[in-house]
Image (cartoon, helix red, strand yellow):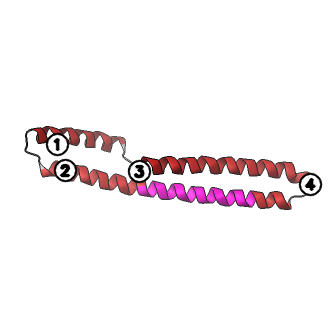
């Protein structure tokens, strides 16, 4: 997964155009390709950190769902409605975090 900053996107696009024009002239400067590769390495590292953080959030949300379900199973009758709402909210948060992880993995 790559995560480019806006400045990196602009710089990479500029370098790409520059390399494209040089390729048309058949005199590509290796510094252009090296700079694009450096930007890609930094973006890949940042993307991996963000993906790891998303996985951590998803695991925390899975644990919250399990805790809410255990609370529901052990709740007294008067508190069951609140426990069900807690389970529903935890499951909704888990779905949101799973969708975020899936979107991030598809962008890879």
* Cα–Cα gap, marks 4 and 1: 70 Å
* Cα–Cα gap, marks 2 and 1: 7 Å
> Residue 107: x, y in percent?
43, 47
Determine if the magenta segment contains residue 12. Answer: no
Q: Secondary structure at mark 3?
A: loop
Residue annotated with mark 4: 77
Residue 19 numbered mark, or none: 1
Q: Secondary structure at mark 2?
A: helix
Tell which tag, 3 or 1, sits nearer the viewer. 3
Residue annotated with mark 3: 108
Determine if the magenta segment contains residue 61. Answer: yes
Q: Residue at x 8, y 39 (%)?
A: 25
* Cα–Cα gap, marks 4 and 3: 47 Å
> Residue 82: x, y in percent?
83, 49
Q: Is residue 71 left or right of residue 60?
A: right
User: Which span is picked out in magenta?
Assistant: 48-68
Mark 2 crowd level (few <14, some 14–19, many ≥20, 10 Å Cα): some
* Cα–Cα gap, marks 3 and 2: 21 Å
Q: Secondary structure at mark 4?
A: helix
Q: Closer to the N terminus: mark 3 or mark 1?
A: 1
Q: Residue at x 13, y 52 (%)?
A: 30
Mark 4 crowd level (few <14, some 14–19, many ≥20, 10 Å Cα): few
């Amino acid at each position: 997964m790559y995560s480019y900053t806006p400045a990196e996107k602009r710089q990479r696009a500029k370098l790409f155009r520059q390399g494209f024009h040089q390729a048309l002239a058949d005199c590509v400067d290796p510094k252009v390709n090296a700079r694009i590769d450096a930007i890609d390495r930094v973006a890949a590292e940042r993307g991996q950190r963000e993906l790891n953080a998303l996985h951590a959030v998803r695991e925390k949300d899975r644990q919250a769902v399990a805790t809410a379900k255990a609370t529901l199973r052990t709740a007294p009758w008067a508190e069951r409605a609140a426990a069900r709402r807690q389970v529903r909210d935890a499951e909704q948060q888990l779905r949101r975090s799973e969708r975020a992880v899936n979107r991030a993995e598809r962008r890879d």
